Image (cartoon, coloured by chain):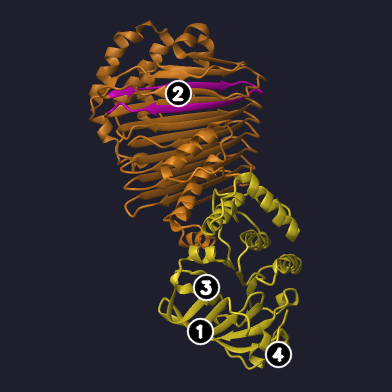
Chain colours: A yellow, B orange
Amino acid sequence: MTRTPDARSLTPPLLEIHDLHATVEGNEILKGVDLVVRPGEVHAIMGPNGSGKSTLAQLLAGHPAYAVTSGSVRFDGKDLLELDPEERAREGLFLAFQYPVAIRGITNSYFLRSAVNAIRKHRGLPELDPLDFLQVLEDKLKAIGWDDSFMNRAVNEGFSGGEKKRNEILQLAVLEPRLAVLDETDSGLDIDAMKTVAAAVNALRSKDRSFVVVTHYQRLLNYIVPDFVHVLADGRIVRSGGKELALTLEEKGYAGAGVTA
Amino acid sequence: MTAHFVGAYEAFAANGASGAPPWLREMREHAITRFAAVGFPTTRLEEWRFTNVQPISETPFELQRATWEVDPVPAGVTVSTIAAAVRAAPEFLQAHLGKYASVETSPFTALATAFLADGMVIRVAARATVAEPIRLRCRIPRGSHPMIHPRLLIVVEREARAHVVEAYEGDAGGDSLTNSVTEVVVAEGARLDLCREQREGTRSSHVAASHFHQARDSRLVFTTVALGAGLVRHDIHGVLDGAGAYLILNGLSVLNGHQHVDHHTTIDHARPHCESHEYFNGVFDGESRGVFNGRIIVRPGAQRTDSKQTNNNLLLSASARADSQPQLEIYADDVKCTHGSTVGPLDPTALFYLRSRGLGGEEARGLLTYGFGAEILDRIEVPGARERLDGEIRARLGVSDMSRTVA
């Protein structure tokens, strides 16, 4: 999927982050981030702990804890920072949470159908009734090779770490975003669970759908192969390159590659 | 103001109640003597610390007949009034009535027993399986300061199986008192699903005692849903008196305004190898207040007890309040007992999670709130009861009526 810079610059960006500064509780975490993601591209953002990776991911989804102090984020030409979290979702932005939240009393299928219908309504499409939704769900499950075993359990309630991460990817599959941000989707997964999740993500890659994959470890990128790799350190992107940059980091460590936290 | 209630008893004993058999009259006499001696509880008593019943004690309540509406009774079960059972099955009645709800345990139970007349008896014959729910509804009459003491006795005999709904409804249009006592016996190998619904007017006081007695290998799933009344105090007492007995207590309170609900539960693990699970959720808006006190007793020798208690309280306004107190008394060494409780507003992280999936703020808040209720309602095993209550909870919380499960 990697394209040459020349061909790339012809496509308008889906996500355009310019000199983004953000604080949490008064501490500056992002100190001038620039990033351009075009349709169909997969960008990996790597970096040591505390570099601001998760802040960036959550900020894009509209987490209220983060305050943008300067800079801009455009999503499909719109000012993303002006939008509420639900508006961002309806415009096609999806965040796979690092720590998915348990919702007591609400079944996964009900939650998913509510979300799908909120997004369909926004797009001027009729809402799905339970039977229509069941059909959509079955198709999606088949496409990513999973069964419906956790659809009638409360959302993430009592789920194992692997089940929670799978559930995030299932939501991604059903909600069909244009940009999916995966926040440390590999954390806490054993190698088999990680392969399962990566295979599902790969099945969802398309020329119109972009991914920003935030990870601390290179190993996920063996399975979800990115077009671009960026290194975030101390709130800035300090290096960018192709997929081979991840291997360099793996080999030499962040410090060995000249990155200081 | 104990004297007003004792006076009401004297009038009752002299008139309508005089036809009762000697054993019942003695039971009432003993009860009013007990009540007169102890009087109404005050907040100085640990058991009543959070619930002030002084307004009840100072209201000149007038004794009224409790009326029961009974849905058509399914085959295999006998439903009769206590008055009819006194004539038709005196020995059966005497063996159970007042045997579990001791007048010593609570002044309100003593008061209810003194006025014991308006009640229903449900008897499920041994090995009978009753698939259709048995539904009884007790209605507070309209009028000036009505007071009723509805009594219910449910006996599920050996290896029988039944579903029962007891509902307390109505609005007197002013101050009223419902003081109910329910005694339940689940015999060896029997199984009962019991659902209690309370939706009285906000000027009602509702005091209730539920006493469960379970024999070996019996199973009871009890769910209580408090939606109405201004003041609710419900004491729930379960005794697991045979090895292998299994008890689930579910409770849900959804309150607003100045409503107050106080659940005091006691689960008495008297025998080994019993299991109990307790799930109480509360949703409190306005200036409403919830109290949960969950006591678990594991008697000496009750080894291999497995007991779990959770109490989650959602505060929807800054003026709402909830207090939660677990109380474990464990006198055996090979047991598993866990408890946990939460009190707080909607989780902002959960709210963000739902919004990040496209749900609007209002919808997300509604869904999270409704989840507190749905978590309890989903545990109801009485056919039809869950759906009915689900609609009521939705209406109260303003959550849209989409079917929650995949068809």
Residue at the disc numbered 2? B137
CA gap between label 2 and label 3 equals 54 Å
- Residue position marked by numbered label 4 in the rendering: A252
Place of residue B246 in the rendered image (x, y in percent of width and height, measured from the top left)? 61, 36
Q: Nearer the viewer, residue B269 or A46?
A: A46
Q: Residue at x 65, y 79 (%)?
A: A44
What range is drawn magenta here? Answer: B146-173
Q: Is residue B102 visible?
A: no
Task: Determine which quarter of the picture holds residue A141.
Answer: bottom right
Residue B84 at x, y percent in the picture: 47, 9
The Cα–Cα distance between marks 4 and 3, rounded to whole angstroms, is: 30 Å
| Residue name at image x 50 percent, y 46 percent | B328
Going from N to C along the chain, the mark reached first, 4 or 1, is: 1
SS for tag 2?
Answer: strand
Please report whichever mark, 1 or 3, sits nearer to the chain's N-terminal start: 1
Q: Is residue B60 above or below residue B295?
A: above
Give the foreground label among 2 and 3.
3
Quadrant of the snapshot with the C terminus of chain A: bottom right
